[in-house]
Image (cartoon, rainbow, N blue to C red):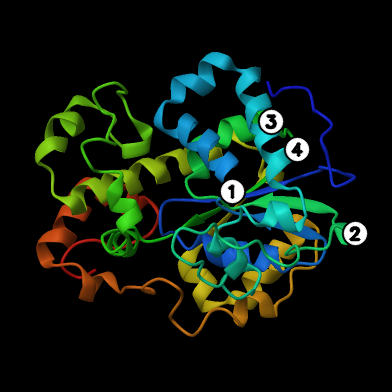
Amino acid sequence: MRSTPHILVVNGTKVRRPVFILGAPHSGAELLARAVKRTPGFHLTTGRPGVLRVTYAFARQPSIASDREKGAARVLRDAYAEAWLVSARACAQCPDECRELAGLPPRPPAPPGAPAPAPAEACADAQGLERFADASPDLIYSADVLLDAFPDAQLVQVIRDGRDAVADMLEDERCLAWFKPGLANLDTVFPNPFFGVEDHTDRNRWPRAATAVKCALRWRGSVRLSARLRQQVPEEQLLTVRYEDLLAKPRAIAAGLSEYLDARVPRSALSGLVRAGEAADGGVGSWRDRLTPRQAAQVEKVAGTELRRLGYRTGPQS
């Protein structure tokens, strides 16, 4: 049973039905985040430091969230109470990725040793805000706490071919940094959902595993969490979008998102951001050119069951 709804007021507006966009690393969630960010009445954030500190604590040590129960929800709610504030000072804490979602230019580089300059104005108009949203990375691992903190939340999850996701992860230094010995906490947390290590077979092969295998484990663990969400969360609180559909028919996805959110998501918000067959990442099927045959086989060996369950073909003819 979810906790009793808590009244949270930010910028003079009650937080009702906040929206959280979830997905595995490089799932394409940022495309939907852009659409929501540019929807009138919405204030979407991503990567605010206070939120990241809390969500990564829950992701990397799930017992923190499960042991504290309502206390975890309160901590997360407090993080968003700060993150959703709208002012030039608050927006100074936003990463460049958040500004890019709003279509704003990146901040000018600061001189060596000087703090980053604050934006001249906020990226949203507090007077017109009605809804709040967040698309910070790796929110999928905090889904239960999100629903405890905001029982009326609406979740949007993005599913993408794991081979394409792994190809992008292999080129992302921030993703790969988690695999460094000093950050991989498998000795203290097992099973470990964040790394997708669920049994002793996974644990024993981890030290010698190729990087593609570790990325595949992360993707597999994330989509397994997504499947559990589908079983546990009421239909009116969870929308699943396939990345490939997002590229193939962006206007239809925008229309479905509008209906789900009960908000007018601009149809051009997606079609204007997505070129035919391409996106910010490598696009559909780019893994064929970006993964070696050995890497592709490794990913399919680790996550083949999940790929097939989601409708992606595997094997020589894939």
| Residue 44 seen | yes
In the structure shown, which secondary structural element does the residue marked by tag 2 occupy? helix
Whether tag 4 and tag 2 are in contact, CB under 8 A, the answer is no
Residue 152: which disc?
A: 4
User: Quadrant location of residue 200?
Assistant: top left
Give the alpha-carbon distance from disc 3 to disc 1, as whole Å. 18 Å
Disc 3 marks a residue whose amino acid type is: Ala
Pick the residue in front: 20 or 9. Answer: 9
Whether tag 2 and tag 3 are in contact, CB under 8 A, the answer is no
Disc 1 marks a residue whose amino acid type is: Arg
Query: From the image, which quarter does the N terminus lie in?
Result: top right
Disc 4 marks a residue whose amino acid type is: Asp
**Residue ID for mark 2:** 127
Give the alpha-carbon distance from disc 4 to disc 3, as whole Å. 9 Å
Return the x and y of residue 122 as percentages of the image width and height: 75, 62
Pick the residue in front: 90 or 188. Answer: 90
In the structure shown, which secondary structural element does the residue marked by tag 3 occupy? helix
Give the alpha-carbon distance from disc 2 to disc 3, as whole Å. 25 Å
Residue 282: which disc?
A: none
Of the residues under marks 1 and 2, which one precedes in the sequence? 1
In the displayed structure, 86 sits above or below 60; it is: below
Front of the two marks 4 and 3: 3
Of the residues under marks 3 and 1, which one precedes in the sequence? 1
**Residue ID for mark 3:** 149
Q: Residue furthest top?
A: 67
Front of the two marks 4 and 1: 1
Exactly how many numbered labels are in the figure?
A: 4
In the structure shown, which secondary structural element does the residue marked by tag 4 occupy? loop
**Residue ID for mark 1:** 48
- For image coordinates 44% across by 59% down, the residue present is 27
Disc 2 marks a residue whose amino acid type is: Gln
Relative to 1, 217 lies left or right: left
